[in-house]
Amino acid sequence: MSDSREADGPDDEPADRPAGAATDEPDEARLRLTVPDMDCSSCAGKVEGALDREGVLSVDTRPTTGVVVLAYDPDLTDVEALTAAVEGAGYAVADAESDGVADDLFTSPRAIATAVGGAFLAVGLVLEWLLPGLDPTFATVGGVGFLGPWAVTGASVAYLLAVAVAGPPILRNGFYSLRGLSLDIDLLMSVGVVAALLVDLPFEAATLAVLFSVAELLERYSIDRARTSLRELMELSPDEAVVIRDGDEETVPAERVATGERLAVRPGERVPLDGVVREGSGAVDESPITGESVPAEKAPGDEVYAGSINEAGYLEVEATAPASESTIARVVELVEAANGEETRAERFVDRFAAVYTPIVVTFAVATAALGPVLFGGGAETWFVRGLTLLVVACPCAFVISTPVSVVSGVTAAARNGVLIKGGEHLEAAGDVDAVALDKTGTLTRGELSVTDVVPLGDRGADDVLACATAVERRSEHPVAAAIVARGEEAGAAPDGEDATAVTGFEALTGEGVRADLDGETHYAGKPSLFEELGFDLSHAHVRPDGGVVRGRDADGDAPDGASASVTEPESCDHGQYLDLASETIPRLQAEGKTVVLVGTETELEGVIAVADTVRPEAAWVVDRLHELGVDRVAMLTGDNDRTARAIGERVGVDEVRAELLPDEKVDAVRELAADAEGGAAMVGDGINDAPALAAADVGIAMGAAGTDTAIETADVALMADDLTRLPYVVDLSSRASSTIRTNIGASLAVKALLAAGAPLGYVSVAMAVVVGDMGMSLGVTGNALRLGNVEPAEPPAADAPADESGA
C-alpha cells in the first residue's frame, strides 16, 4: 500500500506535508485521500459505505477529481484504518501528491491484461468463424450446462483464456460491489461473465470481459482528461521558492517558506506565494489568477499572487500567506470541492438510475427465464438477449454525463479568472432571467475623479485646478481627494507642495471649505455657498480662450473637443458669459456629477465637476447580457435618484432603483427573483453587498483576487475587477446547462433504443457494450470537454466610450 495520507489534526501533523483545512474542534482531524479509480457516483457510494464506521464524522467524496475528504475522531480511528477501509472496498489509494491522473494508463497492468485478453478473443474469433477447419475439438463434456453438452474446442479455449486474463479486475470489483450490496456496473458485468461461462457461452463471456475492460480504460481516460484541467491549475503555483536569508539566496520547497520571509522573483519566473512587493518593479502577468491578459505594473507596496508570472524586472516579495493559503491554492481547493457538489441534474440522474437499473435487471432476468416459455425459441438465444439487457442496465453513460460537464465548466472558468463555487451555481447562472448590478464599484469604478473643469473670468483651467487643489488639500472629503489627485496629476499643484502657503483653513459643514492663499480668502464648495456670498450664477463671465477641460479617456488623456456638458458661451456687453444657474450646473448634475465652484469673496474662478467614472465596458456588458437571453437588467444603488438614472440611461439597464438601504437592496433582489422564471443573479463588489448577494439565486462578487471574504462567501467570484467576465459566466453556464441536458437526453435515448431492441434480437452483447457503455461514455465526456473551449468575449474597441466620465 502506498503512503497516501494528507492529514490534519492533533495526532497527524507531519512538518513537511501540505496543511489540510484544520477544524476548530480539538478532537476532530481531517484526512484527504486520492482515490484515482473512484470516478462515478456509484464508486463514491461504495467508498462512502466503506467509511461508514465508528469515528468517521463526515465524508466528502469528489469522484470527478478522485478525492475523498473526511473528518474523523483520532481517538476512535486512525489514518491507516481509514485508508485500509477504502482499499477494502476495492479502490487503491494513491500517493498523497498524486492528482488522480494516470499518466501511464495504457501501459498499466490492466491495460496490458486487456490487450492480451483481446488477442485471445481475436484468436477465438478467427478459429470459430474464419478458419473453422483448423479449430480442433479437444473434448465434449455432457450434462454440465443446461443448454447441452460443452464442446471444448480451440476457439472456446481461446475465449476462456481471454476471460482468465481480462476478467479478474471485473470479478474482483463485482465481489466488492456484492459485499457492499451495490447494484452497479461491476456487479452486473461480473454476473454476466460468470453466467455466460456457466451456460457454455464462452464467446459472450470473453466479449463482455474484454470489451468492458476496454470501456473502463477509455472511460478512465476521458475522466483523466477532465482531471487534467484541474492539474493545470495546480501546476500554476511553483513547488520551489528562492528565499533571501541573511543576505543569501536559498532555494527551498514553497510550503516551507514562512510568512514574512523575502522571496526573489526574477523575470520569467512564477511568483511562488502571495505577497507584497518590497523592492524592485516590473510587469507581472496575473492572467492565471484573474484572467486579465494585460500584465500589471508592480512597484513596492503592490500585492502579487502565487502563480502569476514576472515578465520583466527583478522583484523582492514579502510572503503574506503560506503556500497552502495562497489565492491559487484556495481557488484549486474550492474548484475541487465544487466538483463534489451535486447539481439538480445529477440528483435527477441518481434518482432515475436507482429506479432504472433494478427494472432493467428484472426485465433481463425475465427475458432469459421466460422468453423460451412464452415466445418459444432456443434457451441460448433468450439467455443471450437477457445478457444483453443486463449490459444495457448499466447506467454509466448518463451517470457521468453531468459530473464531467461540471468539472470541465468549472475548471475552464477558473482558467479565465472566474471562480464558480459548485455545479449547482454553474447550472443556476445559466438559467437566470434577471441580473441586478450594484452601481458603485460594479458599473462604475468606485473612485471619484474630476470629469470637467470650466474656468471663469480671466482664469485658465490650470489656475482653477491649482487653486482648488491648494484649498482642498487639507479636507478629508472624497470629492476633495479627487480634486487634489487630479491637480497633482495635471501638474497644476505638484505633490508635496508647501502646505504652509495655505492658512486659515476651515471646513464649512455641508457647504465646502475656506482657506487663505497668499493672504486672500478662497472658497471651494456647493453652488449654494456662492449664492450666499452674493454671486449671480446666471451670468458668469469667461474669457474667449479660457477653454474647458473634460475628464480623461481610457488612456488617461484629456479628449479633444469641448465638453458636451457645457453650453457655448453667450455674448454680452462685457464679452462672453455662461448661465451657470440654469444651464451649466443643472446639466452637469443631470449627468450624475457633483459640482464644486471655486472662487474668492469677489470673483468666481471656475467650476469643477467630480463623478464616479462609469466603466467603459459597462454598456457593452448590459447589451451582451440581453443577447445571451437575460430579460431584465437592473441597477441597484444607494445613490441619489438623479445620479442613478443618469448612469442607468448611459449603460442601458432596463430598470434603476436608487436611494436603497442594504435591506431594501435585499428586497429588490428578491422581487426580481420572484418575477424571473429562471431566478436572479446579483453582482456586487464586496462585503457591503453581501446581504443582497446572499439573497440572489446566484451571488457574483467582483474583484475577489486576494479577498478572503469574497472568495469564501460568493457563489461566483470574478477574480479580477473586470466586468466583461460577467457575460462570460452567463454564456459558459448556459452552455454547460445545455451540454448537461444534451448528454442526459442522448444517453437515455440510446439506452432506451438498446433496451427495446435487445429482447427482439436486434442488439448483440458487443453492440450493447460498444455503443451503450463505451460509446456513450466517450460521447458525453467529449461533449462536456468542449466547454473548455469557451472563451470570454471582449467588447469591440469601437464600443468603448470616448470618455469615462460619470454619467
Image: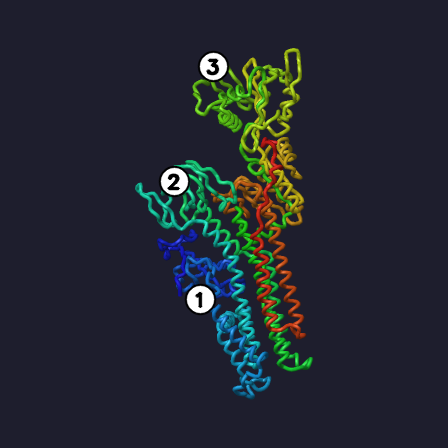
Quarter of the figure that contains the C terminus: top right
- For the point 63% across and 29% down, the residue is 591
- Cα distance, mark 1 to mark 2? 46 Å
**Which circle, 1 or 2, is nearer the viewer?**
2
Amino acid type for the residue under numbered disc 2: Glu
Amino acid type for the residue under numbered disc 1: Glu
Q: Which residue is mark 2?
A: 316
Amino acid type for the residue under numbered disc 3: Asp
For this orientation, the residue located farthest to the left is 246
Q: Which residue is mark 1?
A: 87
Taking 584 as reference, is 71 above or below it?
below
**In the figure, residue 555 lies in which quadrant?**
top right
Q: Which residue is mark 3?
A: 518
- Cα distance, mark 3 to mark 2? 45 Å
Mark 2 residue element: strand
Rendered location of residue 55, percent (x, y): 43, 61
Horizontal side of 221 relative to 78 (left or right) equals right
Mark 3 or mark 2: which comes first in sequence?
A: 2
- Is residue 435 something one can see in this rendering? yes
Quarter of the figure that contains the N terminus: bottom left
